[in-house]
Amino acid sequence: MDIAAIRSGTHKQLPGVDLEDENLVQAQLEKANLAGATLTGSQLQAANLRGACLDGANCLGATLVAADLRASFLGTNFLRADLSRSDLRGSNLRGANLMGAKLTQATLAAALLGGANLTGANLQGADLRGADLRGSNLSSTNLRGAILAQADLQGANLSEANLEEADLRGANLAGADLTGANLLCAELTGVNWAGAALDRTCVTGTDLAQSSARLPKED
């Protein structure tokens, strides 16, 4: 396999290719077809994958720090991958597995994350404004300081999630499970809480005056 040609972008039709543990730092893979590819443990720091297709790819433990990932990742496996500071604006991550993934300071504005599994992921400081997170699993996820303004979290699982100082202005949390979630000092103006589960939810220091929240009464 000519890795140099792949890294330079000469070869872009790579469905099902095995690139496990390969060095693809700064690879030029714009609009590449990597559907079903194996990228386990691969190094893709600062790589350009804009417009690429990685649907069903296996990126377990891969490093994609500061990469351009404005691409399609339908059902992709990012288990324990590092996507910190990456650009995922508008990316299709529906049904993706992001359990334990690192997405600190990542940009996911308007990303499609419906049905994605983000259990235990680290999204501290991430930008998720306007993202579609309907039905996603964000249990025990670190969203401290994250921007979730206008995000759609309808029916999402946010149990035990850390949303301290998060910006949730205008977010849709209808039917979401926030059991045991930490919303300390979060911005909640205009949030839709209809049918949300708020048992043991911490809202200390949070202004609920402009929201529709109705917290359970303490015994």
Image: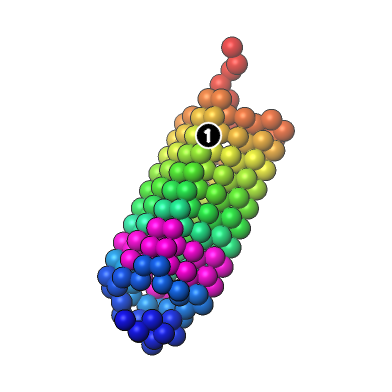
Q: Which residues are magenta?
A: 38-66
Q: Circle 1 sits on which residue?
A: 160
- For the point 54% across and 29% down, which residue is it? 180
- In this picture, residue 184 sits left or right of residue 64: right
Would you identify the image quadrant in which residue 164 lies?
Answer: top right
Which residue reaches farthest left?
16
Residue 40, x across and y down, in percent: 38, 62
Can the viewer see residue 198 in this picture? no
Q: Is residue 154 above or below residue 179?
A: below
- For the point 47% across and 48% down, which residue is it? 100
Would you identify the image quadrant in which residue 94 lies?
Answer: bottom left
Which residue reaches farthest top?
219
Most common SS among magenta residues: loop
Q: Is residue 77 above or below residue 176?
A: below
Residue 171, x across and y down, in percent: 55, 46
Q: Is residue 67 above or below residue 190?
A: below
- In this picture, residue 74 sits left or right of residue 141: left
Could you say which is closer to the camera, residue 72 or residue 45?
45
Q: Is residue 160 magenta?
A: no
Could you say which is closer to the camera, residue 9 or residue 201?
9
- For the point 38% across and 81% down, which residue is it? 3
Q: Residues within 10 Å of mark 1 (few under 14, many from 20)?
A: many
Residue type, label 1: Glu
Could you say which is closer to the camera, residue 218 or residue 106?
106
Judging from the image, the colouring scheme is rainbow
Residue 155, x across and y down, in percent: 43, 39
